[in-house]
Image: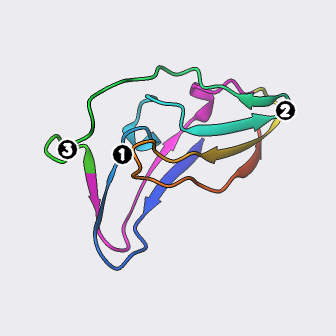
């Protein structure tokens, strides 16, 4: 299990589009880069096309200064990772421009 967290470290409220992130609680885009010893591991989830996000439809989430949102998820649901293998994983950011890319982490699958 992994935890995906978005934090507002600014001194003012912000809004961001949660689409294409684990906060959506369903896989609608390949937003993680997963590399193993055999190269990049592709996403097996479905890709969703939809109209541009809008504030009127509730596609943006407000986040007060100092607040965070997080969700637990299992990356193995959509990326075929093998037990006993080490991987480098990073969030690639949202293609909608709302969330930035993350640093990479290294982990081993048991």
Which residue was labeled with disc 1? Answer: 18
Where is 68 relative to 30, above or below? below
Q: CA distance from mark 3 to mark 2?
A: 41 Å
Residue 80 quadrant: top right
Q: Nearer the viewer, mark 2 or mark 1?
A: 1
Q: Earlier in the sequence, mark 2 or mark 1?
A: 1
Q: Earlier in the sequence, mark 3 or mark 1?
A: 1
Where is 87 relative to 47, above or below? below
Which residue was labeled with disc 3? Answer: 58
Residue 84: which numbered mark, if any? 2
Residue 68 spot, x, y in % from top left: 40, 63
Side (left or right) of 107 relative to 47: right
Seen as rendered, the residue at the extreme bottom is 11
Number of callouts in the render? 3
Quarter of the C terminus within the rendering? top right
Q: Earlier in the sequence, mark 3 or mark 2?
A: 3
Q: Which residues are magenta?
A: 61-81
- The residue depicted at 80 percent of the width and 34 percent of the height is 36
Residue 12 spot, x, y in % from top left: 30, 76
């Amino acid at each position: 299990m992994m935890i995906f967290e978005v934090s507002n470290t600014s001194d003012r409220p912000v809004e961001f589009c949660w689409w294409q992130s684990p906060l959506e609680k369903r896989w609608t885009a390949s937003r993680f880069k997963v590399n193993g010893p055999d190269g990049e591991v592709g996403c097996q989830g479905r890709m969703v096309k939809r109209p541009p996000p809008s504030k009127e439809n509730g596609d943006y989430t407000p986040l007060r200064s100092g607040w965070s949102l997080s969700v637990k998820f299992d990356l193995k649901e959509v990326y075929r990772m093998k037990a006993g293998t080490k991987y480098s994983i990073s969030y690639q950011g949202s293609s909608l421009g709302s969330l930035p890319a993350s640093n990479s982490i290294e982990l081993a699958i048991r």
